[in-house]
Each structure stands twice: as structure tokens, then as C-alpha cells.
Image: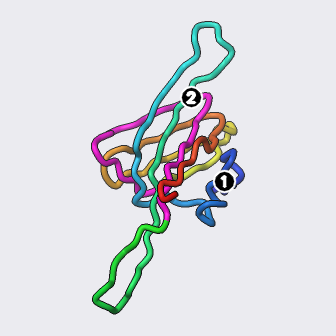
Amino acid sequence: MDAAEELIDGAGRVIGHIGFWPSFHDAEVISFSLSRPLHRAHSVTVAKLCIHYREHEIVGAGTADFEYVCCKSLLIELIFSDLQELSLEDFNRQNVLESIHFKRSQDSSIIAELVSIWGFGGVIRCTTVAVGEMTNLLD
């Protein structure tokens, strides 16, 4: 499998906040949008995926004050450009991911497989993937 840093423009921004490229396990899909160019426009189809990524840490292990505390909470936007294939299912009120796998196909396109735990999942094949807006919800 190809490294995210090689396939995703701006992956270093996510790695800079988190320390690694996440698998997005237990992250929630907040929104997904599609757009296409106007007739005769020189642009491409685009999909935007907004994911709520969280990390928790254990505080007070072995004591009566034991709890999981949210230490990272980010909205991460992934932008898929020049869509070639799109197969999605089950967008609902929560949309929890098992993972997102990225790989390069033989024709040099990028395939993103969104593996679902609950709700939203599917496959996106496109020419480029980039990190868009990132919002730290704990600031």
C-alpha cells in the first residue's frame, strides 16, 4: 500500500497535528459534497469529505477518578479531484468509519476505500487527493 504522504497533497499538515497519518478508525463523516464544472468550463469534478477525528487518553488509571479525556478533536477535509468512479452508501445520522485506505491504481489514479463501521462507506477513484481545511475543535 502506498504511503499517504506520497498520494495526498498536504498530508504533512495532518501529520504535523497528529504525529502520523491516521487510519480514521472511529472517526465520523460529518459531510460529503459533490460539484461539477459548468458546461465548457476548464475544471474537474470535485468531492469534499469532512471527517471528525478524535483521540482520547486515559487519566487516573487505577483510581476512582479514571476517565477517558479527549485530547485531539479535528475536522479534516479531504478533497478528491477529477472523479472517475464513485460508489457510496448508507449516509445517516452518525457515519462511523473503520478506516480509509488509499492506493494508486495501475492507471495512476488514486483509489480511496472508505470502510464503514456504521453508516457511510464506499469507494472513490480520482486523479488527486488533497487535505483542505483543518479545524482544531479544542482551541
Of 21 and 89, nearer the camera is 21
Q: Which mark is residue 126?
A: none
Q: Which mark is residue 46?
A: 2
Please name the amino acid that badge 1 sits on: Arg
| Residue 38, position as x, y percentages in the image | 57, 11
Please name the amino acid that badge 2 sits on: Val
Q: Is residue 90 magenta?
A: yes
Q: Which residue, given by chain and number where applicable, does mark 1 sit on?
A: 13
First along the sequence among labels 1 and 2: 1
Q: Give the secondary structure at mark 2.
A: strand
Q: Is residue 20 left or right of residue 72?
A: right
Residue that protrudes farthest toward the front in the picture? 139
| Residue 13, position as x, y percentages in the image | 66, 53
Q: Is residue 118 left or right of residue 115?
A: left
The quarter of the image holding the N terminus is bottom right
Magenta range is 72-99
Question: Which residue is found at the position 62% from the left and 40% from the top?
Answer: 129
Q: Nearer the viewer, mark 1 or mark 2?
A: 1
> Spatial distance from mark 1 to mark 2, Cα to Cα?
21 Å
